[in-house]
Image (spheres, rainbow, N blue to C red):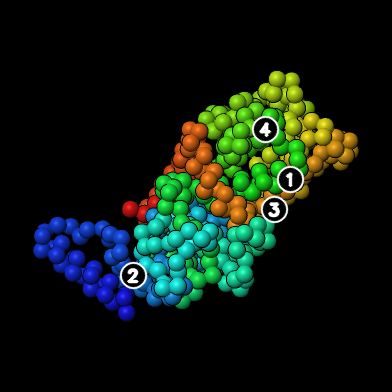
Amino acid sequence: MDINSSNIEQIVRQVLDSMNGAPVAPQASGAIPATAHVAMLTGLEKIEIKEYPMPIVGDDDVLVKVEGCGVCGTDAHEYKRDPFGLIPVALGHEGTGEIVKMGKNVKVDSAGKPLNVGDKVVTCMIFKDNPDITMYDLNKQNVGGADVYGLLPDDDVHLNGWFSDYILVRGGSTIFNVSDLDLDSRILIEPCAVLIHAVERAKTTGILRFNSRVVVQGCGPIGLICIAVLRTMGIENIVAVDGEDKRLAFAKEMGANAVVNFKNYSGAEALADGVKDAFGGYLADFAFQCTGSPVAHSNIYKFIRNGGGLCELGFFINGGDATINPHFDICSKEITTVGSWVYTLRDYATTFDFLKRAKGIGLPIEKLITHKYPLEQIDDAFKTNLKMEGLKIAVVNK
Ligand SMILES: [Zn+2]
């Protein structure tokens, strides 16, 4: 088996290094170690780095050396409460890395681009039971209903999540060659896809146009990326709403041309006036609600003009009920609302182009990654995420 020859290669390398008196060199591409390390969530708030033998790479499989993976809100929920009942589980779905070995049947990625050892890749959904779905089926399946690496129960392969040094991408998974994107951009693909999807949903209302006045409420990573996506589409009249001046300053860097701190206003009416002032005396044509706060949902209708539109994407998980006045907020104003949740495979592929375009117009997307931790300190990565410090937290392998 190849695994044995890899072992021999590794041993020879170590012996040669020790003869030279040099420290053992880090594994170069192609030199696959005998074991892999996986950050396994074995209990609530308990992650253990486990060591497993490198699995056999089947004819349809791809072995990837992990370079990094973002910590998602979903990961943090799972770490704290295990709402999906997955423990023990190897988390991490916002990952990327380099192909070190491929099965003989693997020739191209899910978009038809050639795949080779050394290429940088990301995964999206796993369609083991539904192999007929391709990215060209557009909205056939939202990732919310599909399997993804990083949210799979543990099995005898163990290399199921991106918080690890190797992951085995099995046949039937979608995989994309993203060698033309840098590491930070690749780590941000997954959260950015959520916004590509939301803006595509918003466009279905027919209200979002080139010169639209757009309000984005909530300047966490999701709201900030929303602003960037709108800017890459040519929409420049953007007002950001948040309660933290630091985040609002970042919203300006990402392309908002005015900001409103809701803490400076008492009551929804006063806040709506603040938004109106920020647009030079107009209400918004379109609003994106990017917080998980029921009060924020209730308020946002007051920011929107008659005949305007709203995309609600902040309630990724159940955040409780919100109160609205159906007459004033929706009916008499004739507001068109859409909901948006995660993304489809097509949105994922569109995101690669968004990231290149954002860079092209000088948006500092990579600044969204505020913290990086090595795999051994993954616990600190989760704790930082749960403290709501920073924006995107990532685990990055050396
Ligand atoms: Zn995520």
What residue sits 85% from the left and 38% below the top? 334
Dot 1: what SS? loop
**Where in the figure is residue 206, as x and y percent of width and height?**
75, 40
Taking 375 as reference, is 386 left or right?
right
Circle 4 residues within 10 Å: few <14, some 14–19, many ≥20: few
Quadrant position of the N terminus in the picture: bottom left
Residue 74: which quarter of the image? bottom right
Q: Secondary structure at mark 3?
A: loop
Q: Which residue is label 4 attached to?
A: 210
Measured in 3D between alpha carbons, the distance from the residue under mark 3 to the one under mark 4, in whole angstroms, is 33 Å
For image coordinates 53% across by 45% down, the residue present is: 353
Q: Secondary structure at mark 2?
A: strand
Q: At label 2, which amino acid type do we have?
A: Thr
Task: Choose between 60 and 97: the one closer to the eye.
Answer: 60
Foreground: disc 2 or disc 4: 4
The residue singled out by tag 2 in the image is 35
Residue 372 bears which disc, if any?
none
Q: 109 above or below 231? A: below
User: Nearer the viewer's eye, disc 3 or disc 2?
Assistant: 2
Q: What's the CA distance linking mark 2 and mark 4?
A: 53 Å
Q: Which residue is mark 1?
A: 204
> Could you say which is closer to the camera, residue 384 or residue 171?
171
Q: Classify residue 263 as left or right of residue 4.
A: right
Asked whether the beta carbons under mark 1 and mark 2 sit within 8 Å of each other, the answer is no
Residue 19, position as x, y percentages in the image: 10, 63
| Residue 385 pos. (x, y %) | 51, 48
Mark 3 / mark 4, whichever is N-terminal? 4
